[in-house]
Amino acid sequence: MIRPLEGITILDLSSILMVPYCTRILADLGADVIKIESLVGDNTRYIGPYENKSMGAVFLNLNRNKKSVSVDLKTLKGKEIIFKLIKKSDVFISNIRKSALSRLGFDHKTFVKYNDKIITAFAVGFSSNGPYRDLPAYDDIIQAASGMASYQEAYSDQPSYTSGATADKATGLMLALSVVSSLFKRNKDNKDLEVEVPMFETMVDFTLVEHLYGYNFLPPKDEPVYPRQSSPNRKPYETKDGFIAVLPYNDEQWLRFLKFIKKEHLIKTKKFSTLENRNKNVDELYSLLVKELKKEKINFWIKKLREIDIPSMKINKPKDLFIDEHLKKTNFFKTYKHSTEGDLMYPRLPVYFNNERDNESKFEAPNLGNKTKEILIDLGYDKNEIENLRKEKVIFFE
């Protein structure tokens, strides 16, 4: 069983989705993640269906493999606990605004006094050196600011958000990559490092990967829009009994598809003969798909298109994922019995090392403060000190 980050301790002071998603990945990769929570816990504890009120579905999925320490950071004794944890940690990671963290005394310069090799990673809405730095930011705000909502106009008559928290998750992935890269660098030079990952700039880069297009050049040679992906006819196609995804892309695929529908002469016309020309006239080609695919049922198209090696797939509804034959065969979903929440299921980390994938989570998603006492003992607090901290409402555990 390969856990590349085993032996790394990460102090996670975050909430909601972006950083918890990042630290879930790092925990799945073997890191020891200590989740610092207030005395009432992360907001996601109270989102979604639940067996017990402070263990909502969103929290359960985002926080497996983590330990919870519940502490009031507004108290001097609570801050002292954090500073002691910094001494034993490799990484401190947070999505709380830097100004709020600074008021608590939690910044890179201060942490280095306690641990001269600490990596601090801050996920922020907007980078600290720009005029938006103090603006609040959530996923919807960043989708709007980054142009992503505007690009959705190709499929509707107004800007719209993606149905998932795309900005949170994309930034969480960038943050995880940045943390692992920082650990690699520290192993080389044995020095501290401060990392900042802004949602806005991350999503502008994410959105413009293909859409920078004509604006690669100065002056611009075309619009900042990749035509194929912004075509209103790029969509799931209607058949006689439902919808299907189909994508002939290269010369050979288009030729095979056009031969199958007996329109192979089109591939010889100038506007469809090359990838470049097809990209310029993509709406016309996609209109052809719209017309042709309505003539038969989903199973007919899946069978025939796979026979001629044309990428195609039926449109899965969310519930279909849990019975999908490929996901079942690869044991993508793991079931387990939580000590307080009963039978649960989660998606396993989709990464293989030497053709192996970790089969078990190290820990179940934690009840609030489940490791507070244990970790404080490890920090050198005795039982009387811990009980006094609890009575003073500096910490919480059951």
Image (spheres, rainbow, N blue to C red):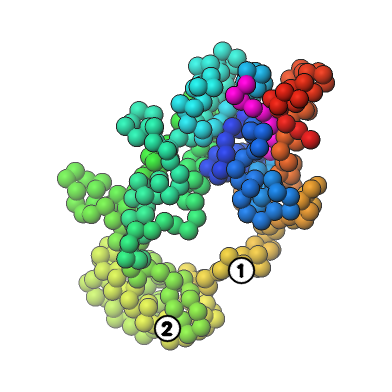
Indicate whether 68 appears above or below 213. Answer: above
From the image, give the main secondary structure of the stretch colored magenta.
Answer: strand
Of the pair 256 and 201, the residue shown nearer to us: 201
Image coordinates of residue 73 in percent, x first then y, are 61, 25
Q: Amino acid at mark 1?
A: Asp
Lower position in the chain sequence, tag 1 or tag 2: 2
In this figure, which residue is indicated by the disc labeled 2? 294
Q: Amino acid at mark 2?
A: Lys
Indicate whether 11 appears above or below 45. Answer: above
Q: Residue at x 51, y 33 (%)?
A: 96
Quarter of the image for the C terminus: give it: top right
Of the pair 120 and 81, the residue shown nearer to us: 81
Q: Residue at x 47, y 85 (%)?
A: 240
**Foreground label between 1 and 2:** 1
Q: Residue furthest right?
A: 383
Q: CA distance from mark 1 to mark 2?
A: 23 Å
276 horizontally vs 6: left or right: left
Q: Is residue 285 magenta?
A: no
Q: Residue furthest top?
A: 113
Q: Residue at x 63, y 33 (%)?
A: 38
110 horizontally vs 34: left or right: left
In this figure, which residue is indicated by the disc labeled 1? 320
User: Are the residues flagged by discs 1 and 2 in contact, CB closer than 8 Å?
Assistant: no
Quarter of the image for the N terminus: give it: top right
Image coordinates of residue 185 in percent, x first then y, are 52, 26
Q: Quadrant of residue 184?
A: top right
Which range is magenta? 66-75
| Circle 1 SS class | helix
